[in-house]
Image: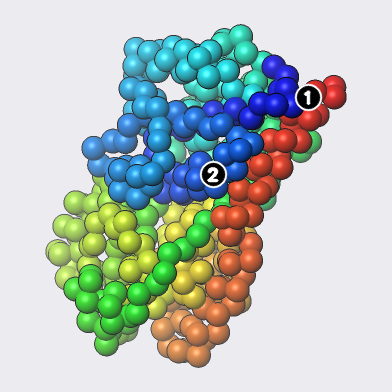
């Protein structure tokens, strides 16, 4: 399909579900930020699970989407087939110049649907992370790799949210270096309330020191490891309290363990006002086994907070170890030691927080993300027209 000079570029974005998290924030930013005089956009997505908050309903209420049953997280041959056929119909109806898929399941369904539809759209896929570590056993992981290798052959451009994510995909021969581009996330943090205002909203004591855990309470985030860190710091009589902003399938377990061990943890549930959580916090802790480029850490940096995190995925591109926070191995002991270093030195927290804000504001602004995507789409279409 060749774009004529007098028509807008039609872009279809396909994502499995818009649950609260990095991919949903990115997609919403792109939907809002693109120049409507040049681009005609359509968002196709599924529904969130019962244990998830829907970003389109809680925050991005201005973003219009076409909902498709079966496109969400769960795997069901019949539902997946019906979703696939509906995506094919949407493509044939909209006739997009660009089909941009996000997240693993939507990447599979969307790219195959693009091939079956008969329209020669430019295909772009973003890896917001990957499923190579911490999700499946050896056989299923090998199957995921095989599927992604084949789909990469039929994808015009592959985007990775961080260099490490790209390198790990290339290491298992998914795509080629020529096809890949690193596309860091971009976002805009809202106005931060004062600490007293934030604590009043959340029912916290502003005289206490708080460490925040922000994100889904699910296996890959290892909330168990987080609670291990809390328990270690409590045994060392550190004067630190913890707040958890998020929900997921392990939330009830975490609440039960925290109550049983009398851990100083307050569970806030899903929060639309992430700025309030950050304003009430003194530092942020992330304990994941696998990550892409977590937006919660970018937001923390923009809020002038130092970070302690496991050194996985592309976190090292957000947190500069020893400058804007500390990166550790996966052991609770290492994480607890890093947290202890920060809470023991107000000047260190202040200095790292200032560097974190300067670094994240410059590198991860939403304006940069929108501009880079618009330029990429125009170049891909130009290259196709001239080939």
Q: In this view, does 309 lie above or below 166?
A: below
Q: Is mark 1 on a helix, strand or loop?
A: helix
Q: Quadrant of the C terminus?
A: top right
Question: Badge 2, how many Cα within 10 Å: few under 14, some, many 20+?
Answer: many
- Residue at horizontal 41 percent and vertical 83 percent from the top: 343
Q: Which of 358 and 7 is in front in this view?
A: 7
Is 166 on the left-hand or right-hand side of 132? right
Q: Is residue 347 visible to us here? A: yes
Give x and y (percent) for residue 208.
Answer: 28, 84
Q: Is residue 224 visible to us here? A: no
State how far apart marks 1 and 2 are (Cα).
Answer: 23 Å
Give x and y (percent) for residue 357.
Answer: 55, 73
Is 202 on the left-hand or right-hand side of 236? left
Q: Earlier in the sequence, mark 1 or mark 2?
A: 2
Question: Badge 1, how many Cα within 10 Å: few under 14, some, many 20+?
Answer: some
- Residue at horizontal 33 percent and vertical 61 percent from the top: 273
Q: Residue 30 carries which label?
A: 2
Q: Residue 128 carries which label?
A: none
Colour approach in the figure: rainbow
Q: Is residue 294 above or below residue 127?
A: below
Q: In which quarter of the image is the N terminus?
A: top right
Give x and y (percent) for residue 295.
Answer: 48, 56
Q: Is mark 2 on a helix, strand or loop?
A: helix
What residue is shown with label 1?
384
- Residue at horizontal 59 percent and vertical 59 percent from the top: 364
- Residue at horizontal 34 percent and vertical 16 percent from the top: 79
Q: Nearer the viewer, residue 43 or 220?
A: 43
């Amino acid at each position: 399909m060749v774009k004529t000079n007098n028509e807008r570029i039609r872009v279809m974005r396909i994502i499995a579900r818009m649950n609260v998290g990095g991919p949903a924030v990115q997609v919403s930013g792109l939907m809002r930020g693109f120049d409507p005089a040049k681009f005609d956009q359509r968002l196709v997505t599924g529904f969130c699970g019962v244990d998830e908050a829907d970003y389109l309903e809680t925050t991005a209420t201005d973003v219009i989407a076409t909902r498709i049953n079966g496109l969400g997280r769960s795997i069901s041959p019949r539902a997946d087939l019906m979703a696939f056929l509906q995506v094919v119909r949407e493509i044939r109806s909209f006739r997009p110049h660009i089909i941009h898929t996000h997240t693993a399941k939507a990447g599979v369904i969307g790219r195959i649907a693009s091939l079956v539809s008969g329209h020669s759209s430019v295909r772009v896929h973003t890896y917001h992370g990957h499923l190579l570590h911490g999700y499946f056993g050896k056989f299923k992981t090998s199957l995921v790799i095989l599927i992604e290798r084949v789909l990469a052959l039929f994808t015009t451009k592959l985007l990775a949210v961080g260099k490490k994510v790209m390198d790990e995909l290339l290491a298992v021969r998914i795509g080629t270096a020529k096809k890949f581009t690193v596309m860091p996330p971009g976002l805009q943090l809202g106005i931060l309330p004062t600490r007293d205002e934030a604590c009043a909203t959340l029912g916290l004591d502003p005289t206490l020191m708080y460490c925040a855990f922000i994100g889904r309470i699910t296996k890959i985030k290892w909330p168990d490891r987080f609670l291990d860190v809390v328990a270690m710091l409590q045994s060392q009589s550190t004067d630190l309290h913890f707040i958890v902003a998020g929900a997921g399938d392990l939330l009830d377990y975490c609440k039960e363990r925290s109550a049983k061990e009398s851990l100083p943890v307050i569970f806030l549930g899903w929060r639309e006002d992430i700025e309030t959580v950050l304003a009430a916090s003194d530092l942020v802790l992330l304990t994941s086994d696998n990550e892409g480029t977590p937006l919660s850490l970018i937001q923390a940096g923009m809020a002038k907070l130092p970070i302690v995190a496991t050194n996985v995925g592309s976190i090292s591109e957000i947190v500069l170890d020893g400058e804007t926070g500390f990166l550790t191995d996966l052991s609770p002991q290492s994480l607890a030691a890093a947290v202890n270093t920060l809470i023991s030195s107000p000047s260190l927290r202040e200095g790292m927080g200032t560097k974190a804000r300067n670094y994240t504001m410059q590198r991860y602004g939403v304006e940069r993300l929108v501009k880079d995507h618009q330029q990429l789409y125009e170049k891909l279409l130009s290259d196709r027209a001239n080939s």
